[in-house]
Amino acid sequence: MHGAVVNAGVRVGENSIINNRSLFEHDSTVEDHCHISTGAILNGGVTIGEGSFVGSGTVIKEGVKIGQDCVIGMGLSVRSNQADYSRYTGKSSS
Ligand SMILES: CC(C)(COP(=O)(O)OP(=O)(O)OC[C@H]1O[C@@H](n2cnc3c(N)ncnc32)[C@H](O)[C@@H]1OP(=O)(O)O)[C@@H](O)C(=O)NCCC(=O)NCCS
């Protein structure tokens, strides 16, 4: 979508939404059926597993791996890996 930036070495799977002004930094991977929301930032080498959602304005630290079918809320800083099927709101993941 408008204003999205996809940097060098990024891989995006099929049927994924790269929403307005999201930033995919170098060597990050987004698997199939994901939604990376408006203004989200994936730093270098981040992996987003199949079917996962990343909310608006959320920043994911370099190298972090988000599992499959995760929901990562908006406006958050994610600094650690998240297991498959996690729901992350910054308080605790479940
Ligand atoms: C993560 C999310 C899906 C959870 O929605 P939900 O299941 O309806 O959860 P609730 O809004 O009932 O919130 C449950 C609790 O988590 C907290 N919470 C939920 N999302 C949060 C967030 N992003 N940041 C901080 N806290 C959050 C709520 O404050 C609430 O805390 P409480 O129990 O102490 O009151 C939603 O909050 C969210 O972030 N949606 C993303 C929207 C978005 O980015 N859209 C993009 C369109 S392009």
Image: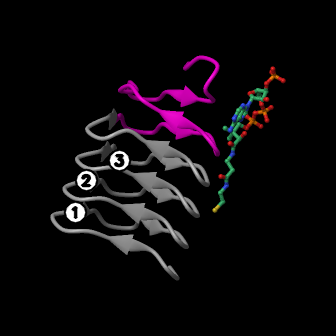
**Dominant SS in magenta:** loop
Q: How many marks?
A: 3
Inter-mark Cα distance, 1 to 2:
5 Å
* Residue drawn at 35 percent across, 27 percent down: 81
Q: Are marks 3 and 1 in contact (CB under 8 Å)?
A: no
Mark 2, residues whose alpha carbon is within 10 Å: few (<14), some, or many (≥20)?
Answer: many
Q: Which type of secondary structure does the marked residue at label 2 adopt?
A: loop
Residue 10 badge? 1
Q: Is residue 70 magenta?
A: yes
Magenta part of the chain: 66-94
Please tell me whether mark 3 or mark 1 is closer to you in this view.
Answer: 1
Question: First in sequence: mark 3 or mark 1?
Answer: 1
Q: Quadrant of ligand 1?
A: top right
Q: Amino acid at mark 1?
A: Val
Residue 7 % position (x, y): 26, 68
The response on whether ligand 1 sits within 8 Å of label 3 is no
* Residue drawn at 48 percent across, 65 percent down: 22
Question: First in sequence: mark 2 or mark 3?
Answer: 2
In the displayed structure, would residue 39 be above or below residue 73? below
Q: Amino acid at mark 2?
A: Ser
Inter-mark Cα distance, 3 to 1:
15 Å
Which of 15 and 63 lies nearest the eye of the viewer?
63
Q: Are marks 1 and 2 in contact (CB under 8 Å)?
A: yes
**Quarter of the image with the C terminus in it:** top right
